[in-house]
Amino acid sequence: MPECPLPFAEFGFIVMAHGGGGRLMHDLLSRVIFPGFRNGHLEHGHDGAVFDAPQGRIAFTTDSYVVRPLFFPGGDIGKLAVCGTVNDLAMCGARPLALSAGFILEEGFAVESLRSVLASMQESAQQAGVSIVTGDTKVVDRGKGDGIFINTAGVGEVRSRALIGPAAVAPGDAILLSGDLGRHGIAVLSAREGIAFETALESDCALLLDPVMALLDAGVEVHCLRDLTRGGLASALVEIAQAGGHRLEIEEDSIGVCAEVRGASEMLGLDPLYLANEGRFVAFVPEAQAPRACQVLRSFAVSAGASMIGRVKAGKPLVTMRTGYGTSRLVEMFSGEQLPRIC
């Protein structure tokens, strides 16, 4: 039986501009998209579909990228497209075997810009040890495509023998966060709106494959992985709580947010818990293995800030956060998305 199906966020290509990893997207998918397809691959809500093949288990995922602007501090739409798809495979415990790339180009899009995007894609693919082996290109009328849209899909070999997904989460698990939050969302917003900071702030856009594979190679019992893209940490945890049927309790003081992101969020009325990330993930492991897991994660630059931020408890499937003031508040899925066109 399939064990690691497509996530709520992965059908983002049909939602309106303000949709993303929030409640509107969740409702659209659960009420319209999923009933239209009805198959076991969609039941558990994860970052890719895992299915049996003659040589073992295979993970398959796809995503579309419409970020604006196309080039932002720390990356561009090409790097984002490859990292995003490789990361989704990694969240299923899979090492990528091959990628595809589909391009929707607007008439008049500069060839040099396209070459830059392709170079970023190739560099990221080489870093992940995977090739882009097939694809498609279409051109639409001027003014109809916003430069370039990219779809990437990926197939990977599942390296974990056990289920990795929300259904494997259990009371007693520790919730680990691989680093600080919100850098991608604020970096893209700063490039879009011309917001300057005292120090350079770059997107966290990066490959997550190596730290995930290292966790598995170290024998850590990984129950669930989720990268924190649209909808951020909050939406990811709410989805996992609902899919797994458990209560998640997190600690605000354990969640890293850099000074630039915190300052920009306060100025703009944004909540870092809901900001998009492209190089951060959460991992659910037995609490006794949390110190070892954090040690493994901290050996990689992309996850050097790994920490335990909460626990899984038996109870009603919801997410609560103990604040810095010692009170507890409910963490809900955001209605819409704080920042559209972020990936």
Image (cartoon, helix red, strand yellow):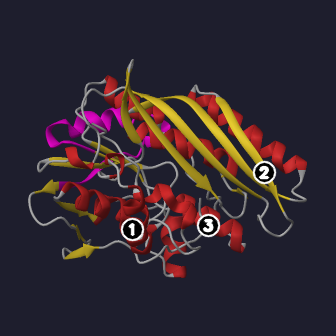
Give the Cα separation between the discs numbered 1 and 2: 30 Å
Q: What stretch is highlighted in magenta?
A: 284-311
112 relative position to 171: left or right:
right
Q: Is 253 left or right of 28, judged from the image as shown?
A: left
The quadrant in which the N terminus is found is top left
Does residue 210 sit above or below 107 in this rendering? above
The residue beneath circle 2 is 138
* Magenta segment includes 305: yes
Say what secondary structure mark 2 lies in.
strand
| Residue 19 showing in the rendered view | yes
Which amino acid does the dot numbered 1 rest on?
His
Vertical position of residue 223 compared to residue 318: above or below: above
Q: Which of marks 1 and 3 is nearer the N terminus?
A: 1
Mark in front: 2 vs 3: 2
Q: Position of residue 221 (x, y in %)?
A: 22, 33
In this rendering, would 330 be left or right of 270? left
**Residue highlighted by disc 3:** 341
